[in-house]
Image (spheres, grey):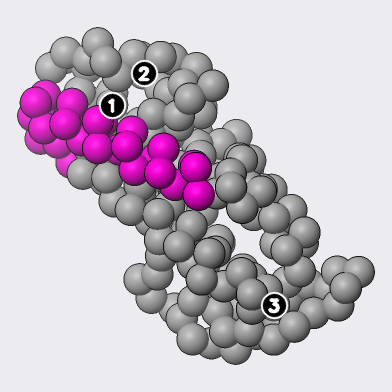
Amino acid sequence: MRKLFAVPAVAVGLALATAACGSSGSTKAASSSGSSGTTTAAASSGTSGAAMTKPALVSKAEGVCKAATAQLGNPPGDPSAVTASDLPAWSTFLQKAESIGTNLVSQLKGLTPPSADQATYSDIVQKEQAALTDIQSAQQSAAAGDLTAFKSGVQKSSQSSTTATQAATAYGMPDC
């Protein structure tokens, strides 16, 4: 199942497929002890906290992503067949996706990866944030009734979602 959008790359992408993390501020540190113990590392905002083991981080992130996907629901139709009269429904759907995606990115930013994985995890979250930004752009175009800009935004969202999904999957988080 290929994703078309991302919330960040997860919820809208999965919902749209059935029809057809970055850093921008502070984060909260989260801690977890795995069988190999915990290590201390800086969160993406520079705040120190107990780093999670990779298995604990992957498990927590996957749970957050799956919950976001479950909250979204189905899109209002096939994004490749949208007409101007469909844009209000898409605007509403993407507003919901933005809200869920913003919460998801915030939760992902709040997880502290193992120090050895900090750069990789930060890159994943930044790609998720970029996908969310593209969803926001598509939503604004839909709200403005601009079909051409909406379709362009959908295309850009699809590309950024794919990039985020590939990075997350390579790390072991296919649901993010």
- Mark 2 vs 1, N-terminal side: 2
Amino acid type shown at disc 3: Ala
Which residue matches tag 2?
Answer: 76
In the image, taking residue 103 as reference, residue 94 lies left or right, namely left
Q: Is mark 2 in CB contact (under 8 Å) with mark 1?
A: yes
Which residue matches tag 3?
Answer: 51
In the image, taking residue 114 as reference, residue 109 lies left or right, namely left
Gap in Å between the C-alphas at discs 2 and 3? 40 Å
The relative height of residue 48 versus residue 149 in the rendered view (above or below) is: below
Gap in Å between the C-alphas at discs 2 and 1? 6 Å
Amino acid type shown at disc 1: Trp
Instruction: Name the foreground residue: 61 vs 164.
Output: 164
Q: x%, y% of residue 51?
A: 69, 77
Which residue matches tag 1?
Answer: 90
Determine the residue positioned at 57% across, 84% down. 42
> Badge 2: few (under 14), some or many (20 or more) residues near its Cα, within 10 Å?
some
Q: In this rendering, which labeled residue sits more in front, label 2 or label 3? A: 3
Determine the residue positioned at 24% across, 37% down. 156
Q: Is residue 165 magenta?
A: yes
